[in-house]
Image (spheres, grey):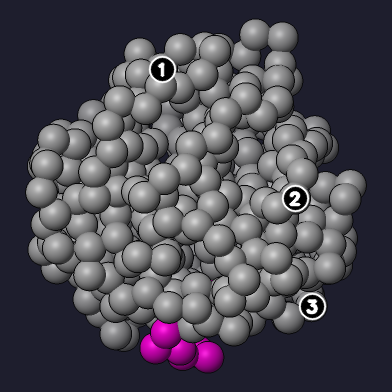
């Protein structure tokens, strides 16, 4: 949904002194020599307090970048999904608080893909902690979301030996606010859940699922209670996206999903097609729209579109896998573009390729928080953008 708090961004990002093991994933959560600095230049419009001089290019220096290891005690690596706990989340007696960040891990300590069993909690201050640990077979994917009723939903796309050849269709797991597994959903519309857009309507919710095994997008409609979810109906609403296994990235398939409630459009980032598509009437349609309408295809800046999020200004942010249309001069990029398909800016989260994946944005009246994982260092990078009076 297009926020009422609209920001117009001009951004310059700088990274220096980043030392890491540049293999695909790192077993240790200890990050050596991480020095990051960032500069955001923002034009503030509706919803944020404005400077008295009404300068169209007010500059804001963000709070220091925070880097947090996503490696829990069992050694899981390869952080994928990222979600903020919403403001009115029903925490009950559980540990989660609004503004906390959850990160799902896809690999185990042996770095085998599709075998990660954990979700870590990163509070607004203090050390990370384990929120959830399941039992194998699990491979917790980028499909991670939170419902205000006090529920966490996460995609499970497990592999027996860390290869795509032994991957199974998987499921959606429902976890309560105390970090306890309470439900699983599987079926023909859940075929390797790789990413998800979770739309919360209180007592109802919609989960749009990107399926790797079928190259399709499914919509699952749920009734929501604090005790769990009830599946009301499911439907494939888009299909035809490139999908295949990959020895490095595990899969190449549709990934990032963003739903715009104002327009009813679901945006789909398809890694293999290296493009972003739009599905109209996504919450109501009962027919398959195919791949939908092409929104953004940019071989200069896109290098295998992955996870996607919406910025406060209505732009889309997409991570790049570097497994498609690779460019060593543009490693681990997150690209910003308009919904009309115009490139805006890009930034790198790691000097080596293959680091960018899950990302999320949280907006309040006076603060925007942007979080993005770096797979190469098994860490989460967090930026705070503060308004001025």
| Mark in front: 1 vs 3 | 1
Q: Which residue is mark 1?
A: 224
Question: What range is drawn magenta here?
Answer: 324-332
Q: Residue furthest top?
A: 92
Q: Which residue is mark 3?
A: 21
Q: Residue at x 22, y 70 (%)?
A: 240
Q: Is residue 328 magenta?
A: yes
Q: Which residue is mark 2?
A: 136
Helix, strand or loop for disc 1? strand
Q: Residue at x 54, y 23 (%)?
A: 151
- Going from N to C along the chain, the mark reached first, 3 or 2, is 3
The answer to whether one can see residue 223 in this image is yes
Give the CA distance from mark 1 to mark 3. Answer: 43 Å
x and y, in percent, of residue 3 in the image: 26, 33
Quadrant of the image containing the C terminus: top left
Q: Is residue 190 magenta?
A: no
The answer to whether one can see residue 379 in this image is no
Give the CA distance from mark 2 to mark 1. Answer: 27 Å
């Amino acid at each position: 949904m297009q926020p009422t708090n609209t920001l117009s961004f001009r951004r310059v990002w700088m990274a220096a002194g980043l030392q890491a093991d540049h293999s695909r994933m790192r077993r240790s959560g200890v990050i050596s020599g991480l020095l990051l600095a960032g500069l955001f230049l923002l034009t503030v419009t509706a919803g944020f307090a404005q400077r008295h001089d009404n300068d169209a290019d007010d500059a804001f220096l963000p709070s220091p970048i925070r880097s947090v290891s996503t490696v829990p005690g069992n050694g899981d690596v390869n952080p994928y999904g990222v979600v903020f706990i919403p403001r009115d989340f029903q925490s009950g007696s559980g540990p989660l608080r609004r503004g906390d960040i959850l990160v799902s891990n896809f690999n185990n300590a042996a770095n085998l893909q599709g075998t990660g069993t954990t979700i870590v909690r990163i509070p607004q201050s203090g050390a990370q902690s384990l929120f959830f640990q399941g039992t194998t077979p699990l491979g917790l994917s980028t499909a991670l979301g939170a419902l205000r009723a006090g529920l966490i939903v996460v995609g499970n796309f497990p592999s027996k030996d860390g290869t795509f050849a032994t991957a199974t269709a998987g499921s959606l797991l429902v976890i309560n606010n105390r970090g306890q597994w309470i439900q699983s959903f599987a079926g023909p519309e859940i075929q390797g859940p790789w990413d998800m857009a979770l739309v919360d309507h209180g007592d109802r919710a919609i989960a749009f699922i990107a399926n790797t095994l079928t190259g399709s997008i499914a919509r699952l409609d749920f009734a929501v209670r604090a005790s769990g979810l009830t599946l009301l109906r499911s439907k494939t609403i888009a299909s035809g996206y490139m999908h295949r296994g990959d020895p490095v990235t595990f899969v190449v398939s549709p990934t990032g999903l963003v739903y715009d409630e104002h327009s009813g459009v679901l945006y789909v980032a398809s890694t293999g097609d290296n493009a972003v598509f739009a599905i109209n009437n996504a919450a109501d349609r009962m027919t398959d729209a195919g791949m939908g309408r092409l929104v953004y295809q940019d071989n200069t800046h896109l290098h295998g579109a992955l996870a996607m999020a919406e910025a406060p200004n209505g732009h889309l942010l997409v991570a790049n896998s570097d497994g498609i249309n690779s460019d060593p001069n543009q490693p681990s990029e997150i690209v910003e573009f308009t919904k009309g398909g115009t490139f805006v800016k890009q930034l790198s989260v790691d000097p080596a390729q293959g680091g960018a994946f899950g990302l999320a944005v949280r907006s309040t009246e006076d603060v925007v928080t942007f979080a993005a994982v770096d797979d190469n260092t098994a860490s989460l990078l967090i930026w705070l953008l503060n308004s001025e009076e």
